[in-house]
Amino acid sequence: MGTYLYLSLVPESLVVSMLPPEEFGAYLATGTQKRPHGQAMFFQIKDGFQSDYFDLTSIEKLCVPHPDGQPKHSVYLGIYRVLEHIPLDAIGSLYLTTAHGRVLELKQGEVPAGPLKERHLYQEICPIHPLIASALAPDQFCRFITDTSKLISVPRICFVELELGDLAEDPSGSGAGLPYHNITHIRSCLSELGLETGKQIKTVDRISRHSILFRCIESGFYIGDQQGMFYYPYPTREDLAGKYYSWWRCANDAEIDYV
């Protein structure tokens, strides 16, 4: 049996497993007593990854089949400051797993070059996870958060852009179809952004929940630092309802509104 190396985002950890991505995702979401059952998000690390920070020499000794021949599900190689110690070029596909164990693979894509919106809503995922309103486009936001010259920063960040509907242009808009329970507070945060106030980001929730409302994802997922950024586009609603119907239905069945 071969081994696979994964960067789990919730919680942040480096894990080696004998399970391929779909089986590993199902195991994380439904098959372990070490964490509550629920969503899982992880990157697959590309073959050939080398590190002076992580002890990869123990993989062959620790990641071996069980006595009954069953594959080893997981061996943790790191649980702290993992994301910052894995080079961007070593990071492969992103896998999103529903609470029921359905897995969707997202591949890297070109950062969208569409018209800029005035306001964005970002859910930071790793290594921190506040919910942030921002006037910055994704690439600008990535550089802002990882700018070590600032009083508060992180070496690298993974985040997702969430839908704002008409609130992206006007915080007093209808907000129709948005399920966020704290919509009044979100409006208030969005209204503080812009040239008049000089404010580029505003924290909506300092301790946001770890799970993501998959139905509220807008552009997709981002991971980057001062040297660059990768983008993982989220499927269109048409593709979710067609090509990825089984995953999409499972994701919607498992989700509840923010409460």
Image: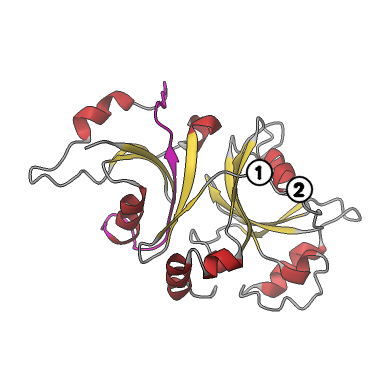
**In this picture, is 167 found above or below 120?**
below
Residue to which mark 1 is pinned = 110
**In this picture, is 38 found above or below 173?**
above
* Residue 113's disc number: 2
Magenta highlight on residue 64: no
- Which residues make up the magenta segment? 31-53
Please give left or right for residue 187 compared with residue 34 in the image.
Answer: right
Name which residue lies at 87% across and 55% down.
Answer: 197
**In this picture, is 50 found above or below 125?**
above
Disc 2 residue type (three-letter): Ala
| Mark 1 residue element | loop
**Callout 2 environment at 10 Å: few (<14), some (14 to 19), or many (20+)?**
few
Name which residue lies at 48% across and 47% down.
Answer: 94
Q: In which quarter of the image is residue 236?
A: bottom right
**Residue in front for this viewpoint, 195 or 88:** 88
Where is residue 4? Give x, y as percent: 33, 38
Are dots 2 and 1 in contact, CB under 8 Å? yes
Please give left or right for residue 2 compared with residue 212 in the image.
Answer: left
